[in-house]
Image (cartoon, rainbow, N blue to C red):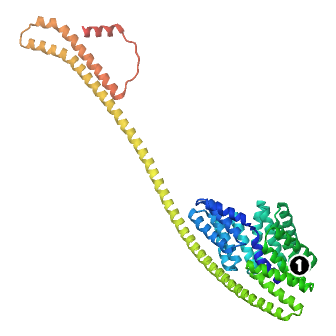
Amino acid sequence: MSRVAFSIGVVLCSWTFVCAQPKDIDSLEKILAQTPAGNEQVDILNSLSRKYLPYKPNVARQYAEQAIEAAQKQRYLQGEIAALNCFSEYEYRQGNYARSVEVSMETLKMAEQIHDSVGMAMANRVLGLTYAFGFKQYDLALKYQLNAVSFYEKKKDKAKTAAFYGNLSWIYAGLKQNLPEAHRFAKRGIEIADSLGDKQLMSYNYNSQGLIFFQEGALDSTLVNLTKSNELAEEASDRAVIAYNKIIIGKVYLQQHKYTEAIMVFEAALKESSSLHLLEVLKDSYDGLGQSYEGLNNFELAYRNHFNYLHLRDSLVNWETTQRALITRLEFEGQSKIAELESANEQERNEQIVYEVLFGLILIFLIMVVLLAARNNSQRKETNRLLQEKNQEIADQNLKLKEANDVKDKFFSILSHDLRSPLTSLKGLLSLLASNEINDEEFRSYAPKINQRLMGVSETLENLLHWSQSQIRGMGYNPTIIPLKAVIDKCLSLFL
């Protein structure tokens, strides 16, 4: 990848979503002053942070920190994620690549936990920029950028999709790989930006297309696209894009040996990058000036600019090395944390298995207890039912026995009366006869009546015998013809 792709990409891609005019910022700050604490206040703070990034990065950081604090108080996770994305982009712009990656990875995890697709896309975007232009790890950068652009394509967000097309075309152009695909992305980005009337996005995508032509060696096409990009950037007040364009234009003039024209554009780029604190662009400006003065045989100015270039390059290389060491440490610590988490998860899984086994055993024991209780309850109910039946049977028998006793008592009462009366009469008559109180003639006059009554007693005893036999052996049914009148006469004589 050429040096120009390194330098221009570092900050250009981070201008994807911000093009704040002062009046926009003033309006938002007035609204913020009248907005009470809450989610709306967090959203306004995040908007101000994004808009201040190209102009006053330190102010952008302050607003991002305020948004993080306010979102945490409100427990507004989406607002906190947006603020963290602003903060990670600030760190990226300051060249603190390791810190930017650290914040972006934490933000990505938070966004994944609450399924915040916008937050995930923005975190992927910053990671893509950092790995592309901070660590030069283009495979990772491409993965993160594609993750982000796929989301905005699905959401049919044309502005952000066009911006990501610019990012992707820059990566492909910087790698000098898949340049037809890079042209397709840049052309599509220009078409979308033109349909939206977004001059900054158009400027950005013309810049990307100019870089692609530069990598292909089509210098005239490079100048046409970069000139168009500059015109649009002037209208959008985007000084950073103008500075980047001048760097590439200066490189074109160097290849064309137009050293005087190259010096003019490198001087302009130097002025723009100094005011915007774009160190990579500043470094390339010194390099271009050194080569241009060398081409004009002005070795004193060539040496002076080349010295400035080497000094700034070494500082940036040392800083980049430091950032690589930090990101390596972060990755190692992350792997250690992952290993610890995996170990903790394994232990938790083992404990979970033990708990599940114990729970299963307890559950089986409880089921057995319930089944035994149900069985005992069923047996108890059956026993109670049988006991009730026995008690009912005993009660029925007691009732029958009582009825039988009542019948017996009534029967014996009747029987004693029927037997006592004739026997008492006979006893009294015999007593009179024994005491000679009556004579034989009188005794004979009473004899027929006494005999009749004794026959009744005999009849009663015979009936009693039949009744007792029926109680012992049961009553049989043997119908016979009887002299009804004789039976009636007997009954009448007994009652008489």
Report the residue at 90% width, 86% height from top: 259
* Residue type of the residue flagged with mark 1: Phe
**Residue 493 in the image: x percent, y percent?**
26, 8
Q: Is residue 137 visible?
A: no
Give residue 345's quadrant in the image.
bottom right
Quadrant location of the N terminus?
A: bottom right
Report the residue at 26% width, 22% height from top: 410
**Residue 94 in the image: x percent, y percent?**
69, 78
Left or right: where 64 falls relative to 208: left
- What residue is pinned by disc 1? 214
**Residue 209 in the image: x percent, y percent?**
87, 73
Question: Image height check: is 142 above or below 408?
Answer: below
Report the residue at 67% width, 81% height from top: 327
Give residue 291's quadrant in the image.
bottom right
**Residue 190 in the image: x percent, y percent?**
85, 66
Give residue 265's quadrant in the image.
bottom right
Left or right: where 121 falls relative to 79: right
Report the residue at 37% width, 24% height from top: 475
Between 370 and 252, the one lying in front of the other is 252
